[in-house]
Image (tube, helix red, strand yellow):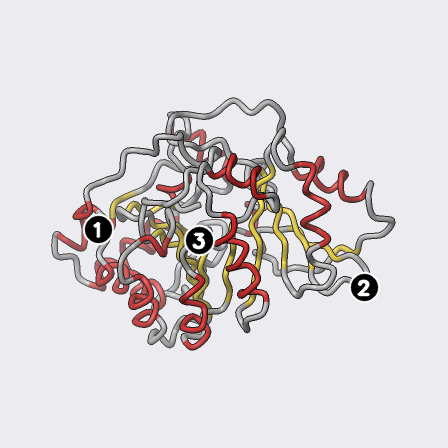
Amino acid sequence: MELKDKFGRKISYLRLAVTDRCNLRCQYCMPSKGIDIVDRKELLSYKEMYRITRVLSELGVNKVRLTGGEPFVRKDFVSFLESLSFNDKLDEINITTNGALISNHIEKLEKLNINSINLSIDSLKKEKFAKITRRDVFDEVFETFQKLKNSKLNLKLNVVIQAGFNTDEIIDFVELSKENDIAVRFIEEMPFNGKGQRAMEELWDFNKIITHIKNHFSYIDILTSKKSSTSINYKIPNYVGTFGIIPAFTRTICNDCNRIRITATGMFKNCLFDGGVFNVRDFIRNGASDDELKELFINTVHHKPENGFIAEANRGNDVSESMSTIGG
């Protein structure tokens, strides 16, 4: 048995949000006062998350990315990682984090053979970083960056491009790849902050971002990426690292999608833009067996929409969740 949709796409990648809570208040992610967080008992337990991951891995899912909220906000997250590392059907366990809380855990993450860390950092300037995140933690995050790039963990930087805030730093981020073996990923801004779709004064989409970079560098190599890659990747000749662009909002990467999402409360999403298909937490707590869960996953994935535009149209209401609740 395997997870395959009606378009023949094999699903092998799970994005699992371990919490809806976050220690930052990034303006593109949530309002300054935060969002309405759910009661803790509504969150998936670690035992439930482990079981979901194991069942999905028996259906061919071999890559898991743990997101939030901020994963390291949740108590005993590192212990959960240790448990997850015993699943020998998983080839990759990756984490997306804002980096403010993980500096003391990096050595442990190396021992657990975590594959990669995606560090969310939208500015290299302390004052601007504080304005974007509404928190004064730049020093902690930059210390994490320094430790991660010197560790054996694969490091990617997630940079959400926001008009009027950090477009003037795009070249600075590319320059980080000159002497560092890292992958910088520029992400189109998503208008999900938990209070409906925000009006964006200007959309810095894929074309605008790559044009800006090409205007600065005389030559750029385009790299061959995996078919299911979420980013279109490039390299400046003689630079050690790479950079890429994730067209998250213009959605030009949907055709080869191999991903599913499960939110911190157990909502199963075939697509970032759908409204959620069913709540796996409720099925588990009502006594569903592993075989019943497998049948549910197989049938649900079969109806995965062809792309994000169709998923958004089918949901019948505006996409308004915070990225912190749907697993940014």
Q: Describe the element under mark 2 as helix, strand or loop.
A: loop
Q: Which circle, 3 or 1, is nearer the viewer?
A: 3
**Are there few (<14), some (14-19), or many (20+) residues within 10 Å of tag 3?**
many
Q: Is residue 29 left or right of residue 19?
A: right
Pointer 3 and pointer 1: residues touching (CB < 8 Å)? no
Q: Residue at x 81, y 64 (%)?
A: 238
Sequence-wise, which precedes: disc 1 or disc 2?
2
**Depth check, front residue: 76 or 101:** 101
> Which residue was labeled with disc 1?
281
- Quadrant position of the N terminus in the picture: bottom left
Residue 316 position within the rendered picture, expressed as x and y whole percent measured from the top left: 38, 26
Residue 167 position within the rendered picture, expressed as x and y whole percent measured from the top left: 67, 36
Q: Residue at x 61, y 61 (%)?
A: 226
- The tag on residue 289 is none
Q: Residue at x 55, y 73 (%)?
A: 152
- Quadrant position of the C terminus in the picture: top left
Residue 144 position within the rendered picture, expressed as x and y whole percent measured from the top left: 51, 60
**Are there few (<14), some (14-19), or many (20+) residues within 10 Å of tag 1?**
many
> Which residue was labeled with disc 3?
100
Q: Amino acid at mark 1?
A: Arg
Q: Describe the element under mark 3 as helix, strand or loop.
A: loop
**Depth check, front residue: 308 or 182:** 182
Position above or below: 65 against 249:
below
Q: Amino acid at mark 3?
A: Ala
Can residue 12 be seen here? The reply is no
